[in-house]
Image (spheres, rainbow, N blue to C red):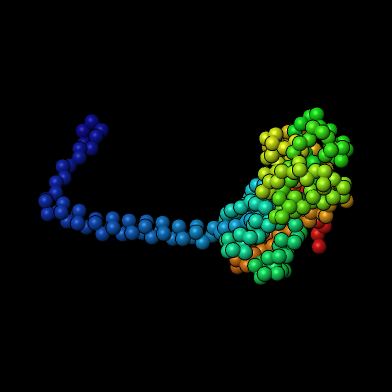
């Protein structure tokens, strides 16, 4: 040893020794790659097994509240994916009857879920009222005054009144009942424009294609519309109560995630969300 350094000895290998070392390492490398591949398969299978999906058919009046509901549901059920289809309740029933792959149906009334039960397309014991909808008269025209709904409907400036399709949308039926209650059906019939569902009726008003519209309170309270126009609630005595019900479909009967979502709809967190969007919530059974 000189100058504080250790002199390294020169090491050499013969060609045969090098070939032996390389050949000896190959099985170890192959085993490593195989183990890594197997581990990836196991993790992938575990993830797929842990993650479930619930397919929700929801009435159009729930267009905004359903986002808040599914977000909260997934916060407490992180391994469940929610897939939502919106539409008029009657249209969704037709889809379910023809085999659409929905696990749970959130209707704008109780009659459509009962219709599915009657045809063995849904579980009778799962029928659950989850909210009571509120019908409002809405306009984006500041010159139309809504303090007196009857006067607003007969205002000469009102040329078009939007409602949801009464054949498939309970909010549309409630609008027609309101006209009848006020003895205005004949007078207002020429002014009625019909949306496929209550969301489309709201779009007619928002775009100016209708001067007034009968829509769900939940829609005008949504962030997208809450600062747009003015609204007044239609007295509940003027129409049949809009009691909204959920039911597990025949397909969803074997999906635990569907049952979990139905239970969630009755929990305090979901009830608070419904109240925030203007719904009344039924008393617990």
Task: Using the image, determine if residue 116 lies above or below residue 188.
Answer: below
Instruction: Please identify the quarter of the rendering in which residue 241 is found.
Output: bottom right
Q: Residue at x 76, y 31 (%)?
A: 141
Q: Is residue 150 left or right of residue 138?
A: right
Choose between 48 and 104: the one closer to the eye: 104
Task: Using the image, determine if residue 250 lies above or below residue 238.
Answer: below
Q: Residue at x 11, y 51 (%)?
A: 15
Residue 67: % across, % down: 65, 47
Choose between 17 and 219: the one closer to the eye: 219
Q: Is residue 192 left or right of residue 151?
A: left
Residue 80: % across, % down: 58, 56
Choose between 25 and 222: the one closer to the eye: 222
Q: Farthest residue toward the left?
A: 15
Task: Using the image, determine if residue 127 lies above or below residue 19.
Answer: below
Q: Farthest residue toward the top?
A: 143
Instruction: Please identify the quarter of the rendering in which residue 234 is found.
Output: top right
Figure label count: 0
Which quadrant: the N terminus?
top left
Q: Residue at x 46, y 60 (%)?
A: 45
Choose between 168 and 156: the one closer to the eye: 156
Which quadrant: the C terminus?
bottom right
Residue 68: % across, % down: 67, 46
């Amino acid at each position: 040893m000189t100058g504080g350094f250790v002199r390294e000895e020169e090491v050499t290998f013969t060609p045969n020794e090098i070939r032996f070392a390389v050949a000896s390492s190959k099985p170890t490398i192959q085993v490593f790659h195989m183990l890594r591949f197997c581990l990836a398969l196991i993790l992938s299978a575990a993830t797929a097994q842990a993650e479930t999906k619930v397919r929700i058919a929801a009435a159009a009046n729930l267009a905004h509240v359903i986002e808040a509901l599914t977000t909260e549901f997934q916060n407490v059920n992180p391994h469940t994916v929610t897939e939502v289809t919106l539409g008029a309740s009657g249209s969704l029933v037709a889809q379910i009857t023809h085999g659409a792959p929905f696990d749970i149906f959130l209707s704008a009334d109780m009659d459509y879920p009962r219709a599915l039960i009657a045809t063995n397309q849904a579980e009778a014991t799962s029928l659950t009222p989850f909210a009571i909808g509120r019908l409002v008269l809405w306009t984006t025209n500041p010159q139309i005054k809504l303090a007196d709904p009857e006067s607003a409907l007969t205002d000469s400036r009102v040329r078009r009144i939007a409602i949801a399709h009464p054949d498939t949308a309970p909010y549309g039926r409630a609008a027609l009942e309101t006209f009848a209650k006020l003895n205005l059906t004949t007078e207002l019939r020429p002014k009625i424009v019909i949306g496929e569902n209550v969301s489309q009726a709201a779009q007619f008003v928002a775009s100016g294609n209708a001067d007034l519209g009968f829509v769900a309170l939940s829609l005008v309270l949504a962030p997208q519309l809450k600062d747009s126009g003015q609204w007044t609630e239609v007295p509940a005595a003027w129409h049949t109560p809009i009691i909204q019900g959920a039911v597990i479909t025949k397909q969803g009967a074997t999906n635990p995630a569907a049952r979990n979502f139905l239970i969630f709809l009755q929990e305090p967190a979901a009830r608070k969300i419904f109240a925030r969007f203007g719904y009344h919530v039924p008393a617990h059974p």
